[in-house]
Image: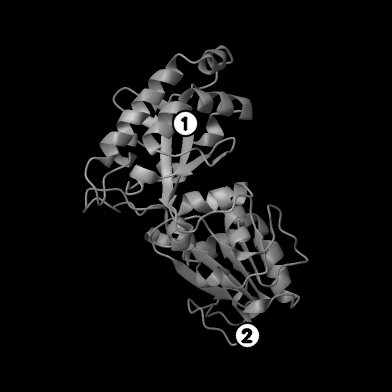
Amino acid sequence: MTANLTSQTSASRRFTLMVSGEDAVDAGFEQNVPPSGLPHERFLFGDRLPIAPVLLLGQSDLAINPNEAIACLQPVHFHATRDHLILMAQSQIDLTASESSKLLQTALPFIEEDFGSKILFQGQRDWFIPAGPFASLATHSIDQAHGRNIDWWMPRDSSEVGIAKLWRKLQNEVQMLWHIDTVNEEREQRRLPSINSLWISGIGKLADLQIPHSLQNVSQVYGGHPLLAGLAKYLGVPQQSAIDFSRLQNTFAWIDRPESIWDDLKRALLSNELDEIEIIDFPNGQVRHKIFTAKDLNKKSWAFWKKSEPLAWSEIISA
């Protein structure tokens, strides 16, 4: 086992598996600002984090201007606790395509007036628009901010003072419109969380995307995260949610339960279907690459007379 990306074998017979990263516990506190992007977001996109144009690329057939800053707008629910608000994940709010369309139509005049542009594309959970006057906002994805006190994660000024205040004004206007909207009346009757706010994130240009080395020459991308559809399209390779274990060579995967495929990957190594497995994870928020060959799959022990045991997934990640 090694943490060195350099290998004597061809990377075309490698399977790369990325594990989602979490913020380091103390990240951002010294600067009194949240960390910019989750570790795996920074790894996939680079420091400028142009998430919105990549999401748009994956959801539409639009020709995207690579030099235009694009923002992603998402209808969300803020859950009120005793002393603060918490952003709920989109998977928790069960928003239908019809509800999304109705809410957008209600807010559309205000959104397009303040952004100075028309909506580019409307998905069920994501709406896309040229960022215009909001291009300099420092924002955070719902993946990073959900389940947390939104005070810490709200958009902030970066290079231009006053932009965050303009955003809060628009956000408040939309919140008031949706508070009395029939969509929320009907959702309340079905005991679903109200759609009571609008989230902005992912602002960036497609030209700012920095593809990591591990993805530059892959022939297939596996995983169901919405970000992967856009990345695969940008790379010009196919993408699918389920892993085809007959096609593992020169592929990249990011899945919800990586431990569930570890036994299959070990078998592929031992049967010489693969030369290497690369594991990318993010201990303490920092990227780490580990490469395994067949000889690395068993635990090392000083008791050489005993039969060695195969490494478990928990040991792979904790090593």
The answer to whether residue 128 is above or below residue 2 is above
Q: Amino acid at mark 1?
A: Val
* Secondary element at image label 2: loop
Q: Residue under circle 1?
A: 76
Q: Earlier in the sequence, mark 1 or mark 2?
A: 2
* Secondary element at image label 1: strand
**Camera-nearest residue between 185 and 262:** 185
Snapshot quadrant of residue 232 = bottom right
> How far apart are the alpha carbons under marks 1 and 2?
47 Å
Could you tell whether 12 is left or right of 199 in the image?
Answer: right
**Camera-nearest residue between 94 and 117:** 117
Q: Position of residue 266 (x, y in %)?
A: 68, 69
Q: Residues within 10 Å of mark 1 (few under 14, many from 20)?
A: many
Could you tell whether 268 is left or right of 131 in the image?
Answer: right
Image point 53% across, 42% down: which residue? 120
Could you tell whether 220 is left or right of 55 in the image?
Answer: right
Q: Residue under circle 2?
A: 9
